[in-house]
Structure formats: C-alpha cells, structure tokens
Amino acid sequence: MGVRLSGRCAHYALGGKMKPNWLPRRVKIAELHPNPDNPRTIKASQFKRLKLSLEEDGTFRPIICDTDMTVLGGHMRMLALRELGENEVDIVLPDRPLNETERQRITIKDNLHNGDWDIDKLANAFNMDDLISWGFPDSILDGHEESDEGSGSGAPRRCPHCGGEL
C-alpha cells in the first residue's frame, strides 16, 4: 500500500506523478536488454576510448534500467563491458515500472550534458593532452580557434575567453 497524504495515496495527491526511487543492484550483463528506441550512437574511435577508460578506471557510473531490465542509460558502457569480457555490472532501477514518457525522458536526460566548462580552470588546472586523451571534446578546447588567423598552421591554442595559450 502506498504512502497516504490526507486520506489519499501520495501518487494520487501528486497528480499521478510520483517520482521513482532508484535502487542499486549488481546483475549479470546478460540479463540486460538494449533499448530498441535508444537514439544515441557512437563512433568506433569513441567506443575504443570508452573501452580504454573502463579498463583504466573501471565502472563508476551505474547503468540505468527499467524494472524489465531494459537499459535506459549506459548502452555503450554495457556493450563495451561485454566486449571486455565482464560478466556483471552495477545498475540502478526504479521501484516501480516506468511509463513510456518517463522511459523516453530518462533516456534523453541521461545523455544530455548540461552546463558549461570554465575554460580558464581547464587551462590552468589540467594538462590539455590529458583532457583530450580522457575524451574531452576538442571542439570545446578549440573554442573559436577556427576563426583565428593562422589556425591549423601550428599556431598555439588560445583560450577563447582570456586569449592565454593553452
């Protein structure tokens, strides 16, 4: 029986939009089902980088699944782990089945990377070669370099905000 608020269940009181509670589990990768509606793709070079990252650092983000074990977030990690010969993976799944809108919303939200980068902090606190090798997009590091005269001719990389050499 659900939580009751003023004589009504919490789900009803919240307009039928009770958020799920996410539960951690460790499961066999073979139990997971790819989402046939997953809109994300990955290039071979990115997939190779993902596998290298998993080999170096392990899996520190769980795969997101619905109660039927359909993967909503982490498809590429699941495929990479399979290729690397892993048998089990950490997942999170909701305490109730998700409706189609929730499944779609979570699939998209998990792949959106909101926010901006502080280019000055990146330039001053990190090695640019490390950032690139860790998969940081060149396009962000390059900023507006393509409009600078002499770009691509060996000119030093410049921070798009302060003009400092990267």
Image (spheres, rainbow, N blue to C red):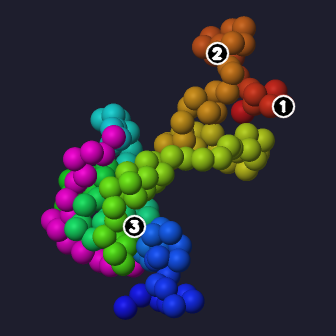
Q: Residues within 10 Å of mark 3 (few under 14, many from 20)?
A: some
Q: Secondary structure at mark 3?
A: loop
In this rendering, the answer to whether 115 lies above or below 158 is below
| Residue type, label 1 | Cys
Q: Earlier in the sequence, mark 2 or mark 1?
A: 2
Task: Give the foreground label among 3 and 2.
Answer: 3
Quadrant location of the C terminus? top right
Q: Callout 2: helix, strand or loop?
A: helix
Q: Residue at x 22, y 54 (%)?
A: 34
> What type is the residue that disc 2 sits on?
Glu
Instruction: Pick out the residue farthest to the top.
Output: 149
Quadrant position of residue 92:
bottom left
C-alpha gap between disc 3 and disc 2: 37 Å
Point 65% across, 47% down: residue: 115
Q: Mark 3 is on which residue type?
A: Pro
Residue 130 visible somewhere in the drawing: no
Residue behind mark 3: 62
Residue behind mark 2: 146
User: Relative to residue 158, is residue 137 drawn left or right?
Assistant: left
Q: Which mark is residue 76?
A: none
- The residue lying toward the viewer, choosing from 39 and 97, is 97
Across and down, in percent, residue 58 comes to 39, 64
| Residues rendered magenta in the picture | 23-39
141 left or right of 49 in image: right
Q: Position of residue 137 (x, y in %)?
A: 54, 36
Which numbered dot is residue 162?
A: 1
Q: Does residue 56 appear to the left or right of 5 in the view shown?
A: left
Quadrant housing residue 87:
bottom left
N-terminal of the pair, mark 3 or mark 2, is 3
Residue at image position (51%, 46%) is: 112
Q: Position of residue 156 (x, y in %)?
A: 70, 22
| Crowd rating for badge 2 (residues with CA inside 10 Å; few <14, some 14–19, many 20+) | few
